[in-house]
Structure formats: C-alpha cells, structure tokens
Image (cartoon, rainbow, N blue to C red):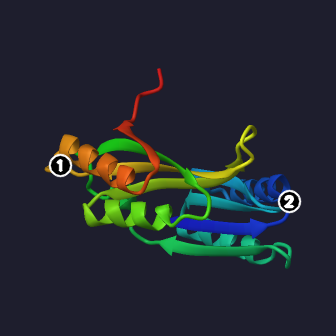
Amino acid sequence: MQLIVTAIGDNGSDLFERLLRGVRESECQIRECRMTRLGGGCACFLLVHGKWNHIAKLESGLASMRPGERIFFQRLEAENREDDGRDGDLLYVADIVTREGSDVLDDVVAFFTHHGLGIQDLRCSSYRLPYVNAMVSTIHLLLRIPPGIAVLSLRDEFLDFCEQMQVDAIFEPVKPVI
C-alpha cells in the first residue's frame, strides 16, 4: 500500500525531519520525497510504501503532529501506479525564462497537455537579475513523451510557440548522470 503525504509548515528542516522520523517509526519506506522552501514557509511531499497496518500507524502519527502545520495524506491502493504502463515514454526537459508577471506558465502547461505529453515534474521560481534590476521567472519541466509523437516536430512547434510569446526556451532529452 502507498500513501502520498503533503505537509506545509514554517520550519522546513524541522518539519521534514519529523516526517522522516514518523515514517521510520511506523516501519514504512520512502519511495520518493521532496522538500522545498516557498517564501517564508516550506512544503514537503512524500510517497511512502508499507503494509496496511504500518500505513495506518503512520496516518495516526501524522494526525497528531503540531496544529500549526497542515498535513494531508491520500492512500493509493494499487501497487502498480508508479509505472503507469508508460515504459516506452521518452523523458525530455523544457526550460523557459520569462519576465515575471506574464501568463507563460499557464500557456506552457496547456501546450504540453494539448499535445498529449505527461508532466512528470514542474518547478517555477522568480529572481532579480543583478545588473538590470528586473524580475524574471524560470520554469523547468520534466516531460514524458509517449511513443508515436514526432519529437522533432514537437520541438520545433514548442520553440515557435515560445518565440511568439517572446520567451527564451530550451527543449532537449534528459541526459543520464554518469
């Protein structure tokens, strides 16, 4: 059995450490996890695997954590959800840089969804450029391209789409880490 855990709180390191301790004490295993700072707070995401009674013990422990923290969890009954039957998919990365305040994120997500691509991971952040004192946003997507989609045509169409929006973009295959 699997459990998706989402936790939101003020002190990221402390919250994440307590979540990990709770998983260990309930005799579950972490399949995937992420902790990220968002403004003055943080968000933690975990995919936990374990026997039904260990998952129930973890749920009880999560429910009793500090009241100021918001913890949500959702059970996944099926064990084979992690592969989704998508063994033939190609993994590609799209990176976009744009002026802050534009609606590029909505348009990019709609573009990839319309073309039948799966979004495996999406990260977006904003920062100030030091020399021109302007705010920019970066969008990083990890995409799953199913078999039958012409990657070169998709790439050309995406880059044309980004050029029309006057944003800088890269679309390339995921390179293995050696």
The residue identified by callout 1 is: 147
Name the amino acid, label 2: Asn
How packed mark 1 is, by other alpha carbons closer than 10 Å (few <14, some 14-19, many 20 or more), is: few
Looking at the rendered structure, the secondary structure element under dot 2 is: loop
Using the rendered view, name the quadrant where residue 9 is placed: bottom right
Residue 11, labelled with which disc?
2
Q: Is residue 89 visible?
A: no
Is residue 96 left or right of 38 when viewed as pictured? Answer: left
Is residue 142 left or right of 97 when viewed as pictured? Answer: left
Identify which residue is drawn at 64% across, 67% down.
6
Is residue 161 left or right of 34 when viewed as pictured? Answer: left
The image shows residue 75, relative to residue 166, as above or below, that is: below
How many labels were placed on the picture? 2
Q: Is residue 51 visible?
A: yes
Looking at the rendered structure, the secondary structure element under dot 1 is: loop
Most distant residue in the front direction: 132
Identify which residue is drawn at 85% across, 79% down.
67
Q: Position of residue 72 (x, y in %)?
A: 65, 75
Identify which residue is drawn at 26% across, 56% down.
85
Q: Depth check: give the residue in front, 13 or 140.
A: 140
Is residue 96 left or right of 19 when viewed as pictured? Answer: left
Q: Depth check: give the residue in front, 139 or 45.
A: 139
